[in-house]
Image: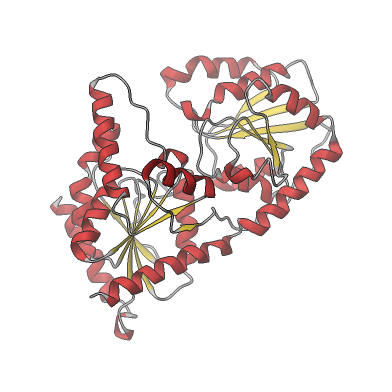
Amino acid sequence: MSRMRGMAAEALRQADAGPTAAHGRRIRLCIVAGGHWEAQRGGAQYQLKCLLDALAQRDEFETFYIAHAVPQRLERETYRIVPVGRLRRGGSLRLLTHLPSVYAALRALRPDVVYQRSLMPYVAACAFYCRRHGARFVFHAASEMDVIPPQLTGWSPSTAIERVRRRIEEFGLHRADVIVTQTRDQARLLEQNYGLAASAVVPNFHPAPGEERRERRGGRRRVVWVANFKPVKNPEQFVDLAEAFAHRTDVEFVMIGRPGDPKRYAALHERISRLPNLKFLGELPLERVNEEIAASDVLVNTSTLEGFPNTFIQAWLRGVPVVSTRVDPDGCLSRHGTGIVAGSAANLVPVLESLLADGERLRRLGEAARAYAHAHHLADRAEQLVELLAKQGGLAQGAQ
């Protein structure tokens, strides 16, 4: 822990010595996360990357990024990365052991505002620090799982640890000064399950796409799935879908994402390798993912739960509609015409068959999806969150 405290203190010393210190103290902001985008590529980490891009345009913030999964290069032009904990196996238990070093880093950095995205044990250290030191704590939900209590039944060492983890997380959640959700659905669930009111609903935001949709030769339709292989994403349902179309030569299927636990998914990858109409491209850089989406006709989502899928926005911005088994945050698919909710995995086949056979409907959905994304999810929506953080910083500094 002393090493972490020393690194945080050095980051603070360098920030205080910066050229803007003479013009009055800026708002000291600590972003706390499990990982940095360059070391842990997930939806929450990408949204933090987009937030950092927005913060870089503002002079009033001194920004630090506290995380345990970090790249080697810690110094950035507009912020500094502060590593905490140790990267080792252990799941929830590992994260719980990080709490002292997260708290030590916060004490060394002395933030005015602490911003945490995604419910994890670190939220307790953030809340505890802010209550003791007069800082403001902003928690931002990143999934419906953040606002729905888990159903943990039976007893085992692992379930006991998960119960402790959730109690610690809920300790922090109940002590946040501000709670932000991605959707109105999440705000409703927060109130329903925890009796807490969301202070703001801030949708996910993305930069406008730079690439153009590629025209495909031969008239083949293309269906893409983008997620990491894990139970909540249900990759086997997309494989089942591709298998149902295996007799057709006019449709190809593509899967993108980390391959998941080899023990759990070895048989599924064997099935994928045998299907002539299905390609698994593995984990790809963001730019390549966007190119693959832009080259597709439909994005399919088979998740049981999500927050607000970044892949929805990536597809919509490129005029690609979404077909989802269940996920429909704030009715963006069913009410706003950006895609179709199949309702179940069994319905995916007839829904996709009908859509791919109707080129005009596919075009209309794609146009509606693009318009919706430009209206609600471009990068300028980050300003709402930046202004909220600035206001909280002013409250913290005014109370000192």
Which residue occupies the extreme bottom position in the image? 23
Q: Give the residue at x 56% y 56%.
A: 205
Q: Give the residue at x 43% y 66%.
A: 388
Query: Picture quarter containing residue 136?
Result: bottom left
Quadrant housing the C terminus: bottom left
Left or right of residue 74: residue 333:
right
Which residue is more in the foreground, 184 or 258? Answer: 184
Vertical position of residue 289 compared to residue 256: above or below: below
Left or right of residue 15: residue 207:
right
Q: Is residue 145 something one can see in this rendering?
A: yes
Vertical position of residue 109 compared to residue 271: above or below: below
The x, y position of residue 94, in whole percent, is 25, 36
Vertical position of residue 203 compared to residue 231: above or below: below
Which residue is more in the foreground, 85 or 60? Answer: 60
The x, y position of residue 48, in whole percent, is 44, 54
How many discs mark residues in the rendered view? 0
Which residue is more in the foreground, 96 or 296? Answer: 96
The x, y position of residue 293, in whole percent, is 66, 41
The x, y position of residue 107, in whole percent, is 19, 61
Q: Give the residue at x 45% y 61%.
A: 52
Left or right of residue 63: residue 43:
right
Left or right of residue 91: residue 290:
right
Q: Is residue 121 something one can see in this rendering?
A: no
Query: Picture quarter containing residue 58?
Result: bottom left
